[in-house]
Amino acid sequence: MPRYIVRFGKMRTLGVFSSSASDNYSRGDEVILRTERGLEAGQVLCEATAHALKQLKNPPRGRIQRRLSDSDRLEVARIHQLERREFELCRKHIAALKLKMKLVDVEHIFGGERILVYYVADGRVDFRQLVKNLAGEFQTRIEMRQIGARDEAKLLADYGDCGKPVCCNTHLVQMPPVSMKMAKLQKATLDPSKISGRCGRLKCCLRYEFQTYQELQKQLPKVGADVVTSQGRARVVAHEILAQQVLVELEDHRRVLLPLQEILTVLGS
């Protein structure tokens, strides 16, 4: 039974979905899925090979029902219109109940089995009355999903200051933590306004080359180490990691930038 990696839902979730032996799908095919949430529309990315499955951690599973038909596309467009109305009604109910939460987005499942309400809040929110009101209004199951700043950007952001679509809303499957240590190692500016993404947190792209920087840094003598260079004895002051160069202070107090090849011996630190 063929299996495929399929992206679905507003959070762009990746799941593993089986299909009947007679149905073959290609990258980009739009399909209707049966997930644990109900019937949903999705897009096939690739076959679920052993290599592809290694990249996913506990992916949701389900079954591909069929290719998206013309009538399905009309239904998807109708649901998007419904979501805009549902968003406004939900916002009015939140305001009426004076709940301390920010509504981010509303997702109406293709099959109508449920509506998911995404929100951000500083702490826990008692939304029981809100759920009752919305269930009565929409006549379906309501699920409240509290999300963080990065997930909010994933739902709403468009382009980063690099000029490209934000990573969290395109290719990123998981969003691992990013630390200031990563920015410092790559000698990025530490100005928060320049290293923060649309979510207000450190940019995810700071993580992309961090491992490479770490591996390259291991090849350089540590800062503070005493070394013998082609120009004499010196102490390591700083690194130029990508260039594989070392800034050293010589015994006559001159500072020079040397390639790694000119560090003859590391004496200690």
Image (cartoon, helix red, strand yellow):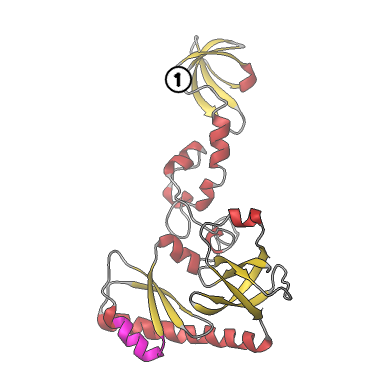
Q: Is residue 98 above or below residue 206?
A: below
Residue beneath the point at 26% across and 74% down = 126
Amino acid at pointer 1: Gly
Q: Is residue 30 above or below residue 216?
A: below
Instruction: Compare residues 122 and 59 and report the one nearer the observer.
Output: 59
Secondary structure mostly seen in the magenta stretch: helix
- Residue 21, percent from left and from top: 71, 73
Magenta residue check for 131: yes
- Residue 125, percent from left and from top: 27, 71
Give the extent of the magenta segment: 130-140
Q: Quadrant location of residue 70? A: bottom right
- Residue 97, percent from left and from top: 26, 81
- Residue 115, percent from left and from top: 44, 81
Residue beneath the point at 56% across and 63% down = 159
Left or right: 52 as drawn, with respect to 269: right
Residue beneath the point at 31% across and 80% down = 94
Quarter in which the N terminus is drawn: bottom right
Left or right: 230 as drawn, with respect to 107: right
Residue at mark 1: 224
Element marked by disc 1: loop
How many marks can you see? Answer: 1
Q: Is residue 13 above or below residue 138?
A: above
Quarter in which the C terminus is drawn: top left
Magenta residue check for 84: no
Q: Quadrant location of residue 99? A: bottom left
